[in-house]
Image (tube, rainbow, N blue to C red):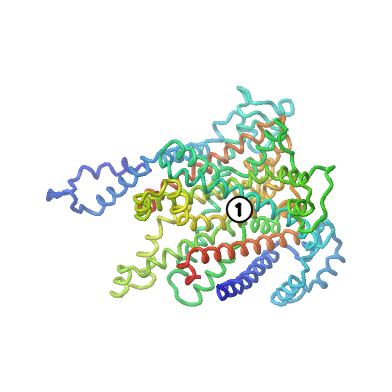
Amino acid sequence: MNVAETAAPVIGRPADQNGLPDSPGTPEIDRFREYRRMWSTFRRSYSAMLGLTIIVIFLILAAIGPWIVPFPEDALGSINLDRKLLPPSAIHWFGTDEVGMDIYTRVVVGARTTLWIGLTITGIAMLIGVPLGLIAGISDSWVREAIMRVTDVFLSVPGLILAVAIVGALGPGIMNAMIALSLVWWPGYVRLVQSKALSIRNETYVEAARSIGASELRIVFVHVLPNCMSPIVVKASMDMGMAILGAASLGFLGLGAQPPYPEWGAMISIGKNYLPDWWWYSLFPGLAIYLTVLGFNLVGDGLRDMLDPRQRS
Amino acid sequence: MGHLILRRLLLMVVMLIGLMAIVFAISNIAPGDPARLAAGPDATNEMVEALRIERGLDRPIYVRFGIYLSNLASGDLGTSLLTRRPVLADIARYFPATFELVLFSIGIAIVLGVPLGMLGAVFHNRFADHSIRFVAVSGVALPMFWLGLMLQWYLALKLDLFPLGGRLGIMTPRPEAITGMLTVDTLLAGDFKTFREAIWYMVLPATALSLPALASIIRVNRAEMLETLNKDYILNARAQGIGPFRVVAAYALKNAILPTLAMIGLRFGWMLGGTVLVEGVFDYPGVGLYATKAAVSSDFDPIIAVTLVLGASFMLVNLLIDLTYALLDPRVRSQI
């Protein structure tokens, strides 16, 4: 988001040589102004900045977590029965679990797992959904009908239960949980991109491009896709949060990551057996999920206000 | 209207067949042998072979899909390896409990969400609005299984205000099963004491289940109300001296409620999925718990059946929402 610094030298160039206040400068300067306007919209929103802060902390933990935690050997599973189920203290900030692993260490290292899960699910869903949505949006024939009917059927089942069914068929495990969630996630992108592409296709500038002989391929990649990007970016940010929530849910059900893999949902799944006396076991991983999802949702809201001022409420 | 209902019902049948195709595909992506999968992990080779021929699994895939559809049509959803009963009987037993839990939850979400959304819009950018928005933003981010656990830990285990889980106390006599829904059956039997108890057991799971829906309903209703309250006809109503409460609750809400209704329908479906998480936490005997137990022990038929039942319920709810939409808004009637 550091647009202001990377683009700083551009300011030095005179933007309006003829002295008019709003005259168009070079394309780079226009783009820079646009970025600056968007960034100032984003920055003015308290909640969007809170979300961004949470995500930056989360990304830092995901990047350097394994090197800053107090008990790195607990990350992937070790047994120290002499310090099992200790309450939170100065040494073990979030307490320890039933085999003596430091929960703070495992929550911090879990950030990396969570980031990886969220990126994979959202990424695969976009890779499947966006092209299908584009095809459905620009083609008039039975292709669109076929794609949209399949999408409708997928959207008519609660995603979580469909994911449970897929994991049930593939067998529990973190890879299978990610595959299952990706398979139920793409229809949302088809619906979004298709409706957007459909409306862009009838815009005058697309008509103009077509009339001067632009190929369908060029129209899709030069005109339609770039104009679909804003809603895709907003949805992707929201979906990062929701995919993380979904993967944690499967982990909690025992269908996702398997212990002792440091995944927040799986940690809560075991921690629930140690309530009420050892409450810290499931409390802290849950808080981590909540804050991360909250961060991505708040940033998603902020991005929507920034990229699409008309929808601001 | 009749024509509309008929067309939507036909569309729903097509969608249901589509859903069955997806479910059929899922049971075929399973690595290894579908016959072995259906027979369960402990079956011998002879049992697997017998099942393969019995189910026609040695035939080509389109024949198998046909067999599958005709099995479903005759109510054969397979047998559960865990309960050793026909899946259809299990579903009939567990679904009513899930249905009343979801209805109760969506009730909570609507009764709290619509007024809170209105309040947020009326007190735009004041303290009340900020607190309501905090609830709305947090609600969708909280993992509902974790929220359920925390409620259980604090309100049930620590303060002993609510039961830990289950559907009714062990010693409480069950009413005669008519609908299968305890709340309805107890009312039909005139047993108000057990009715209260049945509600009491639902409070914590329903709270956990309703929070994301509550949050989205607040969000949509608040945004719609904000927009509606700026319309000219509202200004006109105010200028005519109509009281502020009437303007907001009757004039504005009527127009803001349609998008909220769409959100309620969507959230109802997600709640059906959420029962998988919440019922496990509270040991609530519904189809969600049934499906989860089946999924962790590779008992495949029940999961598929629950997916079908929940998918069909979601489609039905969507149909009802669309029809309500058409009833409330004449402009929509021509479009769907």
Q: Name the residue nearer the viewer: B315 or B48.
A: B315
Residue B25 place in picture, x, y as percent = 66, 67
Vertical order, B128 against B14 (above or below): above
Q: Secondary structure at mark 1?
A: helix
Residue A12 sits above or below residue A161 on the image: above
Residue A276 on image: x %, y %: 71, 32
Q: Residue at x 70, y 53 (%)?
A: B98
Question: What residue is at 83 percent from the left and 68 percent from the top?
Answer: B51
Q: Residue at x 76, y 46 (%)?
A: B192
Identify the amino acid type marked 1.
Met
Give the quarter of the image for residue B154. top right
Q: Is residue A218 left or right of residue A135?
A: left
Picture coordinates of residue B134, whole percent (x, y): 49, 39
Relative placement, left or right, of B29 versus A126 is: right
Residue identified by numbered label 1: A178
Residue B295 visible in this rendered orientation of the protein: no
Which quadrant of the figure contains the N terminus of chain B?
bottom right
Q: Is residue B40 left or right of residue B257?
A: right
